[in-house]
Image: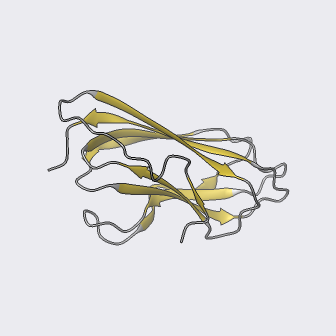
Amino acid sequence: MPNFVARNFTRPKSMRCDGTAVCITDVADITSAVAANETVQYMLPAGLELHRLWIHPTDMDSGSGLAGSIGYAANPQFGVANPTFFRAAGALGQAAGPVDISLPAPIKLEFDLIVTVTWSVAAATFVPGTLTLVALGNAVGPA
């Protein structure tokens, strides 16, 4: 069970099948201190050919401890969860700034994909903030 979900997690996401460029943006409000192994979840729709991800955190740690990894939850296309698929644990949500993930090759999503941010280290001094996901790709439609 996730501890935080993005604002638009449950809203329908249309995916036209014509190769149109797509930019999906969603924001999660991080309103309480996070602990190790807590997660934030975002939904990417089936039919997206994913090329790039950005995670833009606000500064949620006035210290320097907050860290997390970026991966995905279990799903029919990839099987078991992989919490470090996009990025291994590292500074996140502090002054370190945004995380830019350029994929070596596009990934066509045959099923909805839940992108996860899994906290690995709690904040030294937590400050409420937001975690914004931006996903870029092409709308190619599900199989």
Visible residue check, residue 88: no
Residue at position x 27%, y 33% from top?
138
In this rendering, would 101 be left or right of 76?
Answer: right
- Percent x, y of residue 46: 27, 50
In this rendering, would 98 be left or right of 18?
Answer: right
Instruction: Please tell me in which quadrant of the rendered image residue 126 appears.
Output: bottom right
Residue at position x 20%, y 38% from top?
140
Figure coloring? secondary structure
In this rendering, would 82 be left or right of 140?
Answer: right
Answer above or below: position of 52 versus 73. Answer: above
Q: Residue furthest left?
A: 143
- Percent x, y of residue 8: 50, 46
- Percent x, y of residue 65: 76, 57
Number of numbered callouts drawn: 0
Asked whether 91 or 70 is in front, the reply is 70
- Percent x, y of residue 13: 36, 43
Visible residue check, residue 5: yes
Instruction: Please tell me in which quadrant of the rendered image residue 124 appears.
Output: bottom right
Answer above or below: position of 79 versus 21. Answer: below
Q: Residue furthest top?
A: 20
Residue at position x 61%, y 55% from top?
90
Residue at position x 79%, y 52% from top?
64
Q: Residue furthest front?
A: 11
Asked whether 22 or 93 is in front, the reply is 22
Answer above or below: position of 52 versus 21. Answer: below
